[in-house]
Image (spheres, coloured by chain):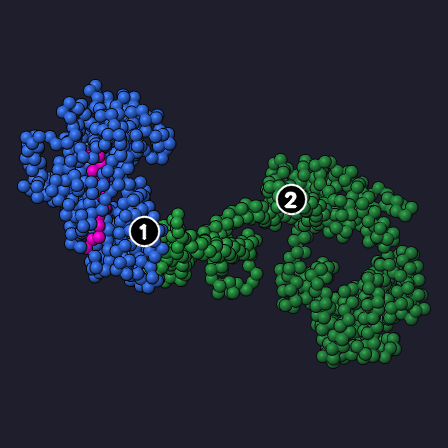
Amino acid sequence: MRNDGDMTDPDCKQQAAPPRLRSVVRAMIWATVPVLLLVQLLASAGVEASSFWSQIRQLDARIARVAESRAELIAEPLWKMRYDQVTSVLNEIMHDETIAAAAVYDDTGTAIARVVARSAGQAVAEISRPINYSNGNMAVQAGRIAIAYSHAALYADTGSRLVLLLVVGLFATFATLIAMRISANIFIGRPLAAMMSAIQRSKQDGRAYPADVKSSNEFGQLAHAFNAMQHTTSGALDRLGHMAAHDPLTGLPNRRSLSEHLVTLSHDAGSPDALIAFCFIDLDDFKGINDTFGHDAGDKFLVHISDRLRGAVEPQDWVARLGGDEFVVIRPEVSNEETAQRFARQLLDTISEPIRLHDKQVVPRASIGLAVRRAGDPELSHLPALADIALYHAKTKAPGTVAVLDEALQRDYRRRRDLELAIPAGFAERQFEVWYQSQVDLESHDVVGLEALIRWRHPERGLIGPGEFLPLIERSGNNGRLTRYVLTDACRALQHLAAAGRPHIRIAINLPPSELADHSLAAELRATCARFDVAASLLELEITEGSLINNMASASETLHRLRRLGATIALDDFGTGYSSLAHLRRFPLDKVKIDKAFISEIPDSAEDKAIVGVIASLAGTLGLTLVAEGIERAEQAKAMREMGVRLGQGFLYHRPQPLEAVLLWLEGQPAHGSRVLEDSPSIAPEFAV
Amino acid sequence: MLADAGPVSEPMRMAKRMTVFLRILLAVGMACGGLAPMRGAVAADAKRLNVVFVNPGKTGEVYWDMVSQTMQAAGRKLGAHVEVLSSERNYRTMQELGFGVVARSDKPDFLILSNEESAAVPILEAAEAAGVRTLLLSNTLIGDDAARLGPPRQKLKTWLGDITTDLQTAGARMANALIGAARAEKWQSRDGKIHILGIGGDEITPTSIARNAGLKRAVEAAPDVVVDRMLFANWTQSEAEHVTTNYLSWAARKEIRPAGIWAGNDPMALGALKAIAAAGIAPGQDIQVVGLNWSEDALREIKAGRMLLTDGGHFLLGGWSIVLLRDYADGCDFAAASPHVEVKTSAITRDNLAAVGDLIKTRAFDRIDFARFRAKAGHCGQYDFSIDALISSLPLPEGAAD
């Protein structure tokens, strides 16, 4: 067996502290063989001992018989004084090796004959018998015979037999050991090894292998049970595998299957030039359905969609649900991109059939990103990413349509990707620039504040607008860093403004939604203001409605803290989102910035004018200052003024510029800073963060 | 007899040398006898008898040679031709010789056999068939044969009878002589008893058993006598010497005074004498020894006073058998008394040694006048084969010498 060594070397055995594999066969042998040997030796020793005593008794009896028979033989020659005959008869008994000496005495007690064995050893026993002579007329005791004999031969015999028994016992034990090892290997070791091997193989590739054991004994039964278990396990593994590769809700293959399927796709393709259409489907506003109808209905909705997709495709097509509201449909062979587009639109149409949820008619909408690639394309595994690019485009540019991945999209994608990768360098090399656009009093045209706007001066691509890179910043998790970057710049700008004699101009900073959830923001803001020795009340934080909705409690808390520091809060892009009027009341707002979408058609659009008018009257009621964004023309400014909007912002007044340019520009503007301060809400700064 | 045929080495050789000398002497004597007128009762017209004797012994065996010699000497005296065939101690040869005699065309008048080892029985039966008369000498039928065939002349008509010696009486006579001598010398031991050692030849043969029985009979009759041991020396001198030595040593340890040694034959008596001498005891003075056989050596010891007596004379059965057959042939059947003729032996002591010693020594059996022993008319079957009769039958030594 494999650990022979540690049996012979006790040190090695002691050192083997970690539990080593001890063969059951070996353990059995070590448990049985010593007992067997001991019992065998004890038994044979016992038998031998009893045999020894019986032999002693037999020897005594035999010598007594010898003495008696010799006495009979000797009686006559002794009586008849044929002493030579007596001696020769006595001599005959010396053939018996146990007899050490013998003597015959006559009736006078004189030794008539005496014989001593050549090797006169230690005589331990002596026996004496009378010699009776009788003939027809008389019976006399003619003398007696004495025999001294030794048990030594018996001891030696017994000793040698014991040695023989020991040797035989050892041999028997050895043979038993061999037999046990062989039979145990056959009956125990082999089935165990077979099962172990099955387990090892199963461990290697996750499949359940049966153990090849044919015997009908307990191990056969065990193996049978093991195989049954393996079978069960196999089924469970299959189910597990299926579960791992499939979406439990819809039963469609999941994201994991997708990558595997992509691998097989290229192999299974008829030719490397066959075109593969990859449709990346994303349901529009699935969150709204979940919110409106509940998650059970949302699940039901997804199942409906998946059933429709299954029904809409050909047998060779492949449908998967990647998670949430994302589906993938792959058609392995399309004749050209047109066909693929038609197919994608077909899918859209299928999806868009109305569904009844809670007795309400719901029309599902989806966007599809379509990517078509040759089967031989080495970048086939990138198909999901490529389709995702198209989908991204569709979602952002034209929800509810099919976007086909083309060179432009790919270029966009690559650009976005490159930009994303360049973000860390952008921070490190201070490529981000903060530009400032003035907010003016629509009445006095005084500059009352500046909005800090981020720009990226990319070393290769030049100046990049925030619309392009802010989503990338957000996606790469750099929102906080950028906010602090802007905050720092704004504080520095405030210093410069103060130095330039414009200490009343405030600077507004856009806070991304994620920052509202960051409790440390208020503390950092205070620390930064302290560092640049500027008043927090000169900072204005612009938030969007969306960021409020996502986390109302947390946002409300952060806003209160900021406000306690003295900063003012402005609601940006008002009118574009949910524009819940309740928000205006619930959150600590100071300003509302009307989105430029409502401004651009003014004064021509009566509707927009009505909306702005309502907003203005509402703000007036709630005591909120209104800011009109995107004022480009004088009549827009005039209309705003007429509707009671205090402040304006736009190209009509000032295009965003770097600080230096703004400072220069400000030199040409009259300074009436005191009014701004008067208009600001009279909220005492609290330093309670 | 086996006993008397025992190897007697030294005296035997002497005897042989003497025999050569005696034969010359015998031839001279025969010539004289032929010239001298026949004395005795054999009539010239009496029928000459043809007798064949199948001798069981070996040539040179003293006893059987002497039996043949007395037989032939008697034949010469009584008109019988005695043919002696020697079996050379081989009973098969003996039987073949006997059958050969019976089958002869010229059948003998009488066939004398000795039933040693019961080997003569088939010959007896063959002789019965052939009509040859038979006489058993020294050894008669015993045991099953005796029971089966019955007494002589009944089932076997031609079996005339047998002539044997009374050895039991001889044994008793020897013992009594020993006891008498011990009593006279007061050789009792401390226990007041006379202690005797018996040395027998063997325990099997009838002749030995008879002698030993004689000893026993005599001792049983003497309450003051104890036979310490009856030892057996296989008829030989050396073994007798050996056992005697052992006995004497034992007796010394037992503080017994050995008074006498009874030996079944002369050689054993001589062996005992040797042992006695070796033990430092004076035979004839401190202890008496008796033997049987009339051997020359015994006679010499008797003469020297070291031995009390030797019994015997049974070799004369050879001569006595011819006497019986002569009488039978002449119409005086010994069976008138009994078909079993038992001859008493006789002791040679210092007293009668002079008379017979020379006869034995010289084997001059022709000196015996066998005719004198024939039955008297009207007294068939009545014989006197005693030593006194023998002595009186011998011519005076002076006369012979002259």
Q: Which amino acid does label 2 sit on?
A: Gln
Residue at 82 percent across and 74 percent down: it is A561
Chain depicted in green? A
**Whole-percent x and y of residue B204?**
32, 42
Can you name the residue that lies furthest to the front here?
Answer: B378
Residue at 52 percent across and 55 percent down: it is A43
Q: In this view, does A105 lie to the left or right of A407?
A: left
Q: Report which quarter residue B104 is drawn in.
A: top left
Q: Which amino acid does label 1 sit on?
A: Met
Q: Quadrant of the C terminus of chain B?
A: top left
Chain depicted in blue? B
For label 2, the residue is A221
For label 1, the residue is B230
Whether residue B384 can be seen here: yes
Whether residue A525 can be seen here: no
Chain letter of disc 1 in the image: B
